[in-house]
Amino acid sequence: MKPAQINFVKECLPAAVSAGAAFNLNPLVILAQAAFESGWGTSNLAKECRNYFGLTAYGCSNAYWHGGKTTVKASSYPLNFRRYDTRENSFLDFARLIRNNYRSAWQVSNDPQAYAKEIAYSPYISELNGDDRETYRRSLYQIRRRKDHILSPAEERLLASAGEMANASENIAGVFRNADQIFPDVTDSQGNVHPLTDATFVPLLTSPDRELRRRAFETYYKQLGQYKNTIAATLDGQFKHCLLYTSPSPRDS
């Protein structure tokens, strides 16, 4: 690998690890996609706007993108792209987008080859803009494989441990809600019985039946309220691993 590419990895790896921990996404696929989208950090968007993923400036602002944008003239029409305050916010916003909007790719991020295929053949890629899905898939996976020539064995072990730790609180919460909890059924205003589970909770809250919505809400949170200490401890674990990733390293002091 070229020295500039190695420097890109060293500089962006902390942001990728932090974003991966926040949204339970493999930091290595985040880093690979940043390298591909930004030309290893050499694109104007990356250098001038700290936008490492080519995210367009559409939709609502959020905790990481505060609405700043820049206009780039394409071949036939202008495009607005997001401008970020920091590199870290660019990585966090990307991980948030993948977790929220591209769940099939997010779910397999620990398998980089499967992730590359899912993201390349998803709406994330626009063939109208001239993107080639198969080229994107191959390129993304090849970039990810190059990390074998960059990271030391100690760094590899650290990343693996970090991924396991990042998943722990979410895995516990998922098992607790989906396997351990048995919620009472709820009835609507007509006396019809509806099963209440973690999966049916949100659909019940969108029911046109006001009485069903109220009963589903009250029953769900009354049940979980019995385990508030367990839930609080799980949330505390999530906070602590987020603090670990956002704390400055000794070399930054």
Image (cartoon, rainbow, N blue to C red):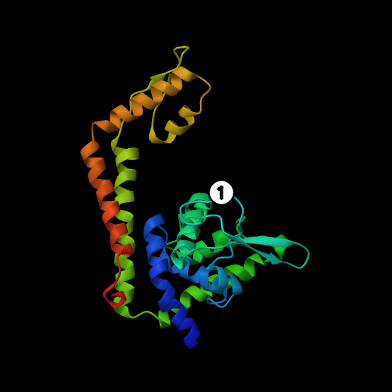
Residue at (30, 51) in percent of width and height: 169
On the rendered structure, is 200 left or right of 49? left
Residue 11, located in which quarter of the rendered image? bottom left
Res 1 seen here? no
In front of the other: 158 or 69: 69
On the rendered structure, is 33 left or right of 44? left
Res 173 seen here? yes
Residue 91 in percent (x, y) is at: 47, 63
Residue 196, located in which quarter of the rendered image? top left
Residue 249 in percent (x, y) is at: 29, 72
Which residue is the site of mark 1?
A: 60
Residue at (58, 68) in percent of width and height: 137
Q: What element carries label 1?
A: loop
Image quadrant in which the C terminus is located: bottom left
Residue 224 in percent (x, y) is at: 29, 33
Residue placed furthest toward the top: 190
In front of the other: 217 or 164: 217
* Label 1 packing within 10 angstroms: few (<14), some (14-19), many (20+): few
